[in-house]
Amino acid sequence: MLFISRKLGLVRQVVLPTVGGSEGVSPLGDDCAYVRLPLESHDLVVTMDVAPRPLAWQVGHQSYRTWGWYAVVINLADLAAAGATPLIITTSVEAPADMAVDDFKGFFEGIAEASQEHGIANGGGNVREAPKFACHGTAIGVTPTDAQLRRNGAQSGDLIVSVGECGRFATAYVRAKNHGFDSLSPDEQTQLCRPRARVNEMQILHSNGLVSAASDNSDGVMGAIWNIAEASGCAIELDMSPESLPERVVEVASEFGYNPWNLMFFWGDWQVVVSVPPGRSDEFWRVSKEHRIPVQHLGRACAGPPRLVGLSEGRRHNLRLLRNENFLKSSFNTDVEEHVEFMLRSQLWA
């Protein structure tokens, strides 16, 4: 008997072939599904995700308000990857009968705060009693029918870019783990507790036709890059020269004994990894600068088969794919501390 804990590629090998597709709905396997509206020029963009307990809980900031914020951001990150305009979010919340009312209220205050900050309407949802607290959210957006942005559009020669900075969340967490949450600067506390989904930035870039494929960083930067490589059938070479590392990442890695690339490729910043056609690269950088969109060059797509290669000091190295994998011992949902150590301490070179 084969158990799901031993099954890699579970979604693509089991779930997708079983569920199949439906008429009027885009092929499954992306961050969002696109739903064709009858007699309309736009598609609905639909996603659903569970609200993760914020990692800040591991360093002393056990706030349900922050958890509520995350319930919104994790779903909006998917809409951002689709370049969609957010419309509405609904939630299904489970809570134990002995949960404090202030905590329960705080969770919904976080949802309201994040919804307002990101410009998405709150459509309510469902609340029920359960043995432990949990929340699932569904977010709906809209995009022009002829402008679906998916994972499978990258081609050889495209630039691979992060829309949003890399490593800010990981460096804040490492500082808090070693010196306590209260030792963080206001900016670092915001990075841990109030990260923003790149919805507005992606709408601007996508509406200008500057990106060909996208995937959000919910399981790690390398996971988002791999999503594009796998769906597009291409290899991706990452620029891993020391000069491309943010100064903050280098400082924290040196102070606490980490490989800076593990911090760089961690999740939590909710950026979107995109591919940019070479003919649009100049305009991509210009528009990003004009709208103050933080972007970071990561590498380049090249001829397949799908694989990740690191270019460092003139040498090419095959990379180990470090990301969150559900149903494994090292997954976020199984043991968060073990998962974080796996992400931050594992060898990157295959």
Image (cartoon, helix red, strand yellow):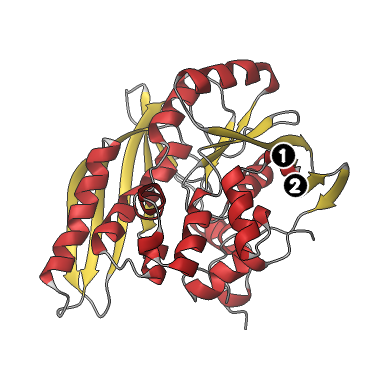
Q: What whole-number distance in Å separates the C-alpha atoms at marks 1 and 2?
A: 26 Å
Q: Is residue 234 visible?
A: no
Residue 92 position within the rendered picture, expressed as x and y whole percent measured from the top left: 24, 60
According to the picture, the residue beneath numbered tag 1 turns out to be 243
Identity of the residue furthest to the right in this view:
315
Picture quarter with the C terminus: bottom right
Q: Quadrant of residue 235?
A: top right
Q: Nearer the viewer, mark 1 or mark 2?
A: 1
Query: Element type at marker 1?
Result: helix
Q: Amino acid at mark 2?
A: Pro
Looking at the image, do the residues carrying marks 1 and 2 touch, with CB atoms under 8 Å apart? no
Q: Is residue 223 left or right of residue 43?
A: right
Residue 82 position within the rendered picture, expressed as x and y whole percent measured from the top left: 46, 36
Counting residues from the N terminus, which is met first, the one under dot 1 or under dot 2? 1
Q: Is residue 77 left or right of residue 345?
A: left
Disc 2: CA contacts within 10 A as few (<14), some (14-19) or many (>=20): some
Residue 346 position within the rendered picture, expressed as x and y whole percent measured from the top left: 68, 67
Q: Which one is nearer the viewer's eye here, 326 or 314?
A: 314
Q: Which mark is residue 36?
A: none
What residue is shown at x 73% (from left), y 44% (from top)?
242
For residue 97, above or below residue 175: below
For residue 334, above or below residue 28: below
Q: Which mark is residue 306?
A: 2
Q: Which one is nearer the viewer's eye here, 168 or 248?
A: 248
